[in-house]
Image (cartoon, grey):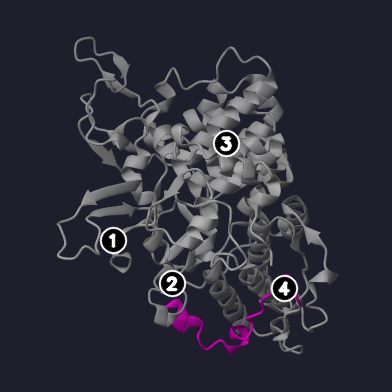
Amino acid sequence: MKIRSFIYALSLMATMSAVISCTETDSSLVEFEEENNFDLPSDTVYSVMGIIKKMQVIADRTVLLGEIRGDLTTLTDHATTDLRQLANFEATAENVYNNARDYYAVIQNCNFYIARADTSIKKRNQSVFLKEYAVVKSYRAWTYMQLALNYGKVPFFTQPLLTEKEADVNLYPKYDIKQIADFFINDIKDYVDTDYPSYSSVGGMNSTRFFIPVRALLGDLCLWAGRYQEAAQYYHDYLTTTGNARPIGVNAVTWDDKQFSHVTSSYNTLFNRTNAETLTFIPMEEEEYDGTISYLDDVFNSTEDNNYYNQATRSQALTDLSSAQRYTMIITDVNTQLPDTISPPDSLAYETQLQKGDLRLYTVITTRSAASSTTMDYSTIRQTISKVTDNSVTIYRLGQIYLRYAEALNRAGYPNAAFAVLKYGLYPSTVQQYVPEEERTAAGDLLTFSQYQFSRDNTIGIHSRGCGTANADTTFVIPSTLTEKADIIEYVEDRIMDEMALEECFEGQRLYELMRVALRRSDNAYLARRIASRDGASNFKDELYQRLLTESNWYLPLE
């Protein structure tokens, strides 16, 4: 059954349309029935599905606010005014993508559930509500994190607001991202070992992927809080969970032969929501009649609804970064039978510029010419970005977790281990060979991987997903000229940021990654320079650069 038919009759959650105004009291915050409690087993399914219905409303924004305002995407001439305002950091209170009320609708529903769910009720000596309780707590933490990332300091409350007096936002403190992170680390850490609920298939989708991995979310919160050792530990423990280990795999896009004449890709399969790479997604309806659908397809792809004029595409900065990478391949010399490392020659004539360097961008975004139309209303150039689907919005993916694990390891003081995530992949033999003993000893179990679950057969350096055999690339190294640890950490962090761009483009993560590093380094220019250069160094936007030197301009107006 479709999501809509699954929750349409759930009148309890349907009435929970609580939203918040940040300038005045909003009576819609008091729509809950004060005496209503969750005390029946059936309430567990109904309540969680109702919250997911609220999350559908913010799903597209989760991608657009992080992507359109980053440095990897640029807008076409057919982009809407609202998207242009986002890209230029000039969004007003009236911008269609600026509505904090929708985030608070999720939070208010979570608060209500958490306050009213009776976790003491047991069946067969197990808490009836514990699994859903953990799910709802993680939804609330994730939504507050999104809210703070997009609005800066936000009104913070964890109890359901049931009266107009309680709905006065002036009664509540305003928390920034670090305060929110610190609060929710403590709030959800006890649920790391709580199993997901099991609802089987919902609308043909694996419902366990509707839920946010608590350990991965804790890693994110610790990154924002600057608690890097803890972040690395949470990511490591999530990836190496006994009985459910998650090696990075060997999916990649590669040149088939030493003439560099043909490309083969298993990389694109990673973005299918049924692939193990996809950890969490927000399910969307297929038709407007059924509820909230995703419009990301109409922004990034050429569709009939937009007359085949996509509104966003790859930036020149992303194109330049991708083509600047070095692809390496190991071949066996037919005469000596010895391995040899080769790369495409500078003189190679590519079919498209996107084949130069890293191949991930080439396989993710495709453009083609269509036959001339009888009407001038239709574009004859068609773009497709394979990461974008119309029936789900991915919010956690395995490659993303590995890169954040590397970011945390690096800032925790283990840069060689962090770089190994990019170049070699971490498993027992690579840890032993490429991470210095002093660093291995200091890191302890942060670098512990089962030899039975992690090996060269299921683990590659994430850079190899697009750059061939990265462990054979003699130029992809930490320079020996760097002797100070602080300099090494910053260098590795820059390589991780490059890798995040190559691996996560069009997924809505970029602005927040730039923010995290800029805040960490106390260097607003780090973010400003990259975003102002999205259209290439020769098209540097100085006005945008100057605007982004002020941190408050990074956020949407909370009105």
Mark-to-mark CA distance, 1 and 3: 32 Å
Dot 3 lies on which element? helix
Q: Which residue is mark 1?
A: 308
- Tell me the kind of residue under disc 1: Tyr
Q: Which residue is mark 2?
A: 293
Mark-to-mark CA distance, 4 and 2: 25 Å
Q: Which residue is mark 4?
A: 111
Residue 1 shows up from this direction: no
Q: x, y (%) of residue 552?
A: 70, 50
* Relative to 391, residue 352 above or below: above
Mark-to-mark CA distance, 1 and 4: 42 Å
Dot 4 lies on which element? helix
Dot 2 lies on which element? loop
Q: Is residue 15 magenta?
A: yes
Mark 4 surroundings within 10 Å by alpha-carbon count, few (fewer than 14), some (14 through 19), many (20 or more): many
- The C terminus is located in which quarter? bottom right
Mark 1 and 3 residues: CB-CB less than 8 Å, in contact?
no
Mark 1 and 4 residues: CB-CB less than 8 Å, in contact?
no
- Tell me the kind of residue under disc 4: Asn
Mark-to-mark CA distance, 3 and 4: 39 Å
Identify the residue at image location x=55%, y=28%.
419
Q: x, y (%) of residue 530?
A: 54, 37
Q: Earlier in the sequence, mark 3 or mark 4?
A: 4
- Tell me the kind of residue under disc 3: Arg
Q: Which residue is mark 3?
A: 529
Residue 283 is left or right of residue 108, and the answer is: left
Q: x, y (%) of residue 345?
A: 27, 20
Q: x, y (%) of residue 546?
A: 63, 41
Q: Which residues are magenta?
A: 1-24
Mark 1 surroundings within 10 Å by alpha-carbon count, few (fewer than 14), some (14 through 19), many (20 or more): some
